[in-house]
Image (tube, helix red, strand yellow):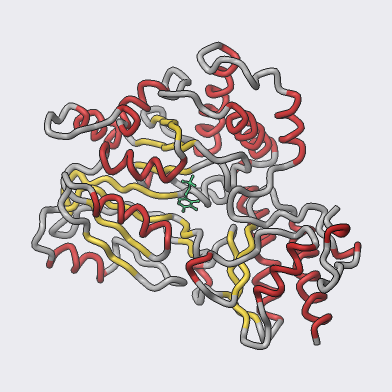
Amino acid sequence: MAASHIPSDVPVLPADLQPSDGRFGCGPSKVRPAHTNALAASPLMGTSHRQAPVLNLVASIREGLRALYHLPSDWEIAIGNGGSTAFWAVATTSLVRTRATHAVFGEFGQKFADETLAAPFLSPSLVISAEAGTVATLVDERALSAFAQDEGPDVDLCAYPHHETSTGALSPLYRVTPRSAGVAADALTVVDATSIAGGVTADVTATDVYYFAPQKCFASDGGLWFAFLSPAAQERARTLRGQADRWMPQFLDLSVALDNSVKNQTLNTPAIATLIMMDEQIQWMLANGGLSAMEERCRASSGVIYEWAKAHPFASPFIPREEWRSPVVATIDFDEAIDAAYLARVLRANGVVDVEPYRKLGRNQLRIATFPSVDTADVEKLVASIDWVIAQRV
Ligand SMILES: *Cc1c(COP(=O)(O)O)cnc(C)c1O
């Protein structure tokens, strides 16, 4: 389809190298064509979100997520508008009592830290950071001694990304327990799973809050946030709501989102299309083996890219340690002989899109999403295409 628009100075990919679907972006990500067809056929578009058909759709999403994650019955799923970025603001008002700590090893972790750092009603956050391409945790010796030595108030919310989408680094999933001085006894562990939820198995009970948005592994559109909340997190939200000295707009009040979500609603109007495609994807995941099968798919697809990089002297995975390498976002660095921006430009002109690196990282790199919707056969075509474009140039 793209070939007719290709500028004359750009090589045209041979047909047998064209992936059947050329979407490899980190979000919004490839939506399975069956799911956009389901959207087109749905009688729910243009109908009230306060009536049974849409309420049942939200109920199906909540039940599906519970089934995927085997959520304990005393955990709740809250839903709100505004995507994960809005959830950072919600968490800042509704979950941090006095002070937050953040593990930061890329752009998304930094954005949440910036939010709590800017809140006038909180003590300055304690940020444990590490270079892009690596992982910082809040449970290693460096973090524990930072907590113990710090003279500020105890931290009561501990935040980290399960997966840093800007670099393709995967963190272990863990709870911060108050075995160190400087951590409040009831500290909550709050995890950004925006781009990994749906792509790997996860024991979310190792956290208190596990939140994400639908436009990555869940292959829907943006604009919503979902948060799994432990009993302790629900309790924190309700307590802070009652705190007289904290201004809390309804939109940022997690207890309001909770009250609505248990009734299968959101505070204000959600994008129905996003809900429809999210539900389709969840049902597809459940029908195809659940999270462990999704992880297998993602590891097979990303494995094709990492193996390809290993086999080429001019390419190497950006993430040095194998256990940190993401199964859903493969970042590959190139040496100076290869111009990654040129590769991305040729691929884009040929309808293979969104493999550019995260813009602020500024590396000679390709970043390729291998979310569950992406077919491994298409990833094989993609690396063959990259080989072909490189061969054209020399
Ligand atoms: C995409 C992403 C976000 C931002 O999500 P929005 O829904 O666009 O606000 C936050 N965190 C991570 C890890 C992401 O990958």
Q: Judge whether 234 appears above or below 177 on screen.
A: above
Residue lying furthest top in this view? 51
Left or right position of 393 against 341: right
Q: How many marks?
A: 0
Image-quadrant location for residue 58: top right
Q: Judge whether 196 appears above or below 70 on screen.
A: below
Q: Position of residue 162 (x, y in %)?
A: 44, 55
Residue lying furthest front in this view? 8
Quadrant containing the C terminus is: bottom right
Query: Residue at position x 82%, y 53% from top?
Result: 20
Query: Residue at position x 23%, y 35% from top?
Result: 236
Query: Residue at position x 69%, y 68% from top?
Result: 344
Residue lying furthest left in this view? 151
Q: Position of residue 222 (x, y in %)?
A: 55, 40
Left or right position of 167 against 218: left
Left or right position of 91 against 222: left
* Front one among 302 and 333: 333
* Front one among 163 and 249: 249
Q: Position of residue 44 (x, y in %)?
A: 65, 19
Query: Residue at position x 48%, y 67% from top?
Result: 360
Q: Judge whether 306 appears above or below 54 on screen.
A: below
Q: Position of residue 365 (x, y in %)?
A: 60, 74
Q: Judge whether 329 appears above or below 207 on screen.
A: below
Left or right position of 208 against 314: left
